[in-house]
Image (spheres, rainbow, N blue to C red):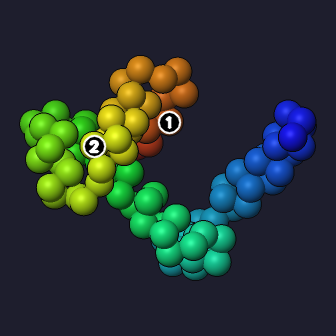
Amino acid sequence: MKKNQIAEPMDELLEALLVIKDKNEMARFLKDLCTPQELNAFVERWRVCKLLNKGDLSYREISALTGASLATITRVSRFLKDEPHHGYRSVLKKVS
């Protein structure tokens, strides 16, 4: 798939997400957009992200609390600390 074949639909999705103004509307949109498993994965990653950000639990403790695999926890940790996107950091600052 060419880059613009992904970029344009991604921009359209981002625009759709940006017009949503409340939790109820967002929940309804996400339930229509995602499978239950996909939503669960989002919830799990966000919970892992918040726990990692606190910094007081080991990966195994986070796994026990969330049910997330060590691979998922490691991936979230990498994106939280090392990747250049800083998406997790940006949102954490806004919700903290």
Q: CA distance from mark 1 to mark 2?
A: 21 Å
User: Which percent across, then down, holds residue 16?
Assistant: 73, 60
Q: How many residues crowd around disc 2 within 10 Å: few (fewer than 14), some, or many (20 or more)?
A: some
Q: How many marks?
A: 2
Q: Who is closer to the viewer here, 66 or 53?
A: 66
Foreground mark, 1 or 2?
2
User: Which percent across, then down, holds residue 79?
Assistant: 43, 31
Q: Residue 35 is drawn in which quadrant?
A: bottom right
Q: Residue 7 is drawn in which quadrant?
A: top right
Q: Who is closer to the viewer here, 91 or 59?
A: 59
Q: Which mark is residue 87?
A: 1
Q: Residue 28 is drawn in which quadrant?
A: bottom right
> Which residue is at 14% across, 44% downward?
60
Quick check: 55 above or below 64?
above
In the picture, measured across the screen, residue 21 lies left or right of residue 14, that is: left
Callout 1, which amino acid? Gly
Res. 90 visible in picture? no
Quick check: 72 above or below 22?
above
Callout 2, which amino acid? Leu
In the picture, measured across the screen, residue 74 lies left or right of residue 64, that is: right
According to the picture, the residue beneath numbered tag 2 turns out to be 70
In the picture, measured across the screen, residue 83 lies left or right of residue 57, that is: right
User: Which percent across, then down, holds residue 3?
Assistant: 85, 34
User: Which percent across, then down, holds residue 85?
Assistant: 54, 27
